[in-house]
Image: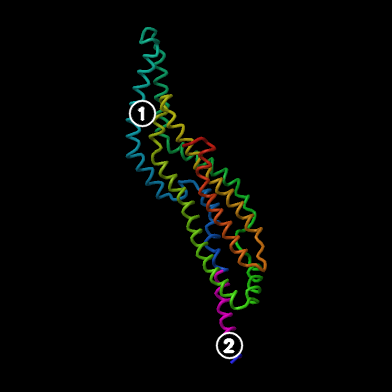
Amino acid sequence: MDSILEQITDWLKEMLVSGIMQNLSGMFDSVNQRVGDIATQVGTTPAAFSPGIFGMIRNVSESVIVPIAGMILTFIACYELIQMIIDHNNLANFESWIFFKWVFKTFLAVTIITNCFNITMAVFDVSQQVIAGAGGIIAGSTAIDSAALDSMQATVEAMDLGPMLGLYLQSFIVQTTMWVLGILIFVIVYGRMIEIYLMVSLAPIPFSTFGNREQSQIGQNYLRSLFAIGFQGFLILVCVGIYAVLIQSVAFSQDIIASLWGVVGYTVLLCFTLFKTGGLAKSVLNAH
């Protein structure tokens, strides 16, 4: 009878060890893949990220938004001309050179609208160069190497059946958690690019306000927002670099559970900081 129980126990242990190691080796794949792709994704300009989407956004903006921006610019130009005339004591001290000034300002405003996509892409070209230059901050891999997994397997095989069962259940929970965190990282990175496309599609409207000193605050804030979302990629890359260093500091010792939950904690921290990068970039550049 004892030999039968030992055989059953050994069979259960073999199944649990196989299941635990499968969970341990696969639980970080999703997050590691997303984290590894971040440097590439955030360093890609909107035009290169998805040429099809970018072409569609540009066509819609030029066909629908530019005419609206033209009407806004016409109203602002007329308002600016009236203000320039009445500022000189209601024509009592009228000078003809203000018409040349008005023509020059209107010409610049029209030029800005007609080249708004070139201006917006220049913003992201600058931020992409900064991100590419900072790509070397990720000095280490965020994945667990094979040596750590071999050491963990030896520790698992030495466990009793009860603790091994508890480890299997917790490793399954951790695997599910890491899968969810991988999805969150995907949403943050790709959501930033969707936000860029949405902002770029409306670029002609805020650019049309540069013809008037008072209304130009709209355009200035829009440019600050563009720079903020561009340099958000730099902050995301810094977060990934910090995460890589923290992961390398985790010691997968005899206490496997504490090590696993430590990695989960660092990954949750990564997701939290990624969510904060957008607001931080806007606050630094005073965009709202």
Q: Nearer the viewer, residue 246 or 260?
A: 260
Residue 110: x and y in percent read 39, 29
Residue at the (36%, 25%) spot, across then down:
76
Report if residue 36 is visible in the image.
no
Q: Label 1 sits on what residue type? A: Leu
Which sits earlier in the primary sequence, circle 2 or circle 1? 2
Give the numbered dot on residue 73: 1
What's drawn in magenta, residue-wise? 3-23
Side of 283 where 65 appears, left or right: left
Residue 227 higher or lower than 78, as above or below:
below
Above or below, 277 relative to 66 = below
Magenta span dominant secondary structure: helix
Label 1, residues with CA under 10 Å away: few <14, some 14-19, many ≥20: many
Residue 239, x across and y down, in percent: 58, 50
Answer left or right for 41 relative to 244.
left
Q: Is residue 214 above or below residue 193?
A: above
